[in-house]
Amino acid sequence: VEQLAMQGAHVVFTYRGQQNVAEDVAATLRSQGYWCRAVQTDLADSEASRALVENIEQDWGPIYGLVNNAGITADKSFL
């Protein structure tokens, strides 16, 4: 998040828990002049994920890049 913001990207990142940590990261970057927003979302909920994308595009414009670090556990081969 920090590196993307410092390179000039407008960053919206999601978090599921630890709201105070996420908000602190976003607030610190904004105080340094970078564009950053934190949004609480459960990415395991497909409707919430869809609404997140719609809201980001409506409020802040099109999404030009995506970094996904939300993990899943699978007991079988992905392919």
Image (cartoon, rainbow, N blue to C red):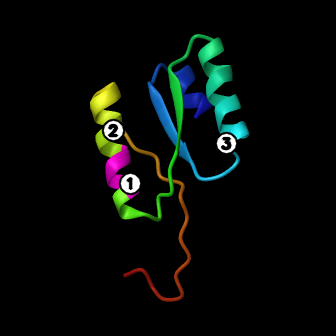
How far separated are the C-alphas under marks 2 and 3?
19 Å
Q: Residues within 10 Å of mark 3 (few under 14, many from 20)?
A: some
Contact, CB < 8 Å: mark 2 with mark 1? no
Task: Assign the magenta stretch its main secondary structure.
Answer: helix
Place of residue 13 in the rendered image (x, y in percent of width and height, measured from the top left)? 51, 39
For the question of whether residue 42 can be seen, the reply is yes
As drawn, is 47 to the left or to the right of 30?
left
Contact, CB < 8 Å: mark 3 with mark 1? no
In the rendered structure, find residue 30 and report the number of the disc placed on it: none
Place of residue 35 in the rendered image (x, y in percent of width and height, measured from the top left)? 50, 19
Whichever of callouts 3 and 1 sits on the residue coming sooner in the sequence is 3
Residue at position x 39%, y 55% in the image:
48
Residue 40 lies within the magenta run: no
In the rendered structure, find residue 19 and report the number of the disc placed on it: 3
As drawn, is 26 to the left or to the right of 21?
left
Residue at position x 36%, y 39% in the image:
65
